[in-house]
Amino acid sequence: MKNNSVVLGVDTSNYTTSVAIIGIDGELIANLKMPLRVKEGERGLRQSDALFSHTVNIPQLMKQAGEYLYGKDVVAIGVSEKPRNVEGSYMPCFLAGVAAAESIAQTMHLPLYRFSHQCGHIMAALYSSKSDELLERDFAAFHISGGTTELVRVRNVDGCFQTELVGGTADLNAGQVIDRIGVYLGMPFPAGPHMEQAALSNTKKIPRKKLSVNGMKINLSGLENMAVTLYKESNDKALVAAFVFDYLARAISAMIDAYETEYGKGKILCAGGVMCNRIIKDMLSSKYDVAFAEPAMSADNAVGCACLALRAFKSENNCD
């Protein structure tokens, strides 16, 4: 295998167009992203709008990728084709990435490996946190973002992941709640970074409300109502933001406690944009053996797809 061989990754989630390039030796060469635009005051994108935005973004990202690919030999492509590894999992926005990756693979006669967006997040977190040892055994992983709040038990099978859903939200996703409250407070969408900045400036005592938890399942719809009530009473954005993240961190802790009661203690991988929040990370790190992706790889990215494709390619070609 040539030293200049690389693998290309593509991911088109609901809010970010992503392309990544990784060397055959596992070195990350490029992690390129373009966020999808959301109109001011709105709390998300329709799938038709997301799909259109990806078709506009992909050529621009591929042009950037071309600068990193000069003199390189692309040997494989990995792409996310659906949200999760379960029957019926589907979102139209992923069609844009699949179309682009399939076109390149057909034209260049390259192997194309398809993965779920969730598996890409898990692999990116493993890669970023240098937790490769988890690949040798079953492990727990959180995938918490705007579109997902899940606790899964993960097995690595033939270079890809098999995930068993064991816990998560029964209603709203954590990222949804953060964005809804942030927009209510007048912050731009996506509101996560703005909410975090506000929360870190809070100096007041955070009210502790009772969690809605049943084993490894949590309910988060009540959090939005409590946050709105708190703002009406206090008129304090920083306090409300701190309250939201404190509540979410305690809810995640409750899920971990229930998981460890059933499966035993072990390192827990944390992936997804919500899991790069400093307040949540600090609270969980103080109590559990947790591994977090770097912020750039907690948010949506194509690095995980590139890494998974590299593993699959090496396995098929008996590469060390």
Image (cartoon, rainbow, N blue to C red):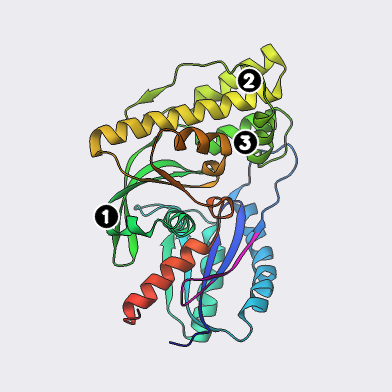
Where the C terminus falls, by quadrant? Answer: bottom left
- Which secondary structure, mark 2? helix
Q: Nearer the viewer, residue 245 or 78?
A: 245
Q: Nearer the N terminus, badge 2 or badge 3?
A: 3
The residue that label 1 is drawn on is 137
User: Pointers 3 and 1 in contact (CB under 8 A)?
Assistant: no
Disc 1 marks which amino acid?
Arg
Dominant secondary structure of the magenta stretch?
strand
Q: Earlier in the sequence, mark 3 or mark 1?
A: 1
Q: Quadrant of residue 243?
A: top right
Drawn side of residue 58 relative to residue 108, left or right: right
Residue 114 pos. (x, y %): 42, 67
Amino acid beneath label 3: Asp
Q: Earlier in the sequence, mark 1 or mark 2?
A: 1
The residue that disc 3 covers is 179
Is 172 placed above or below 295 here?
above
- Residue 64 included in the magenta stretch of the image: no
Kindly identify the residue that appears in the image at 55 percent across and 65 percent down.
Answer: 97
In this rendering, the label closer to the viewer, 3 or 1? 1
Q: Residue beneath label 2, please?
A: 228
Q: Quadrant of the N terminus?
A: bottom left
Mark 1 neighbour density, 10 Å: few (under 14) some (14–19) many (20 or more): few
Marks 2 and 3 in Cβ contact (< 8 Å): no
Label 3 residue SS = helix
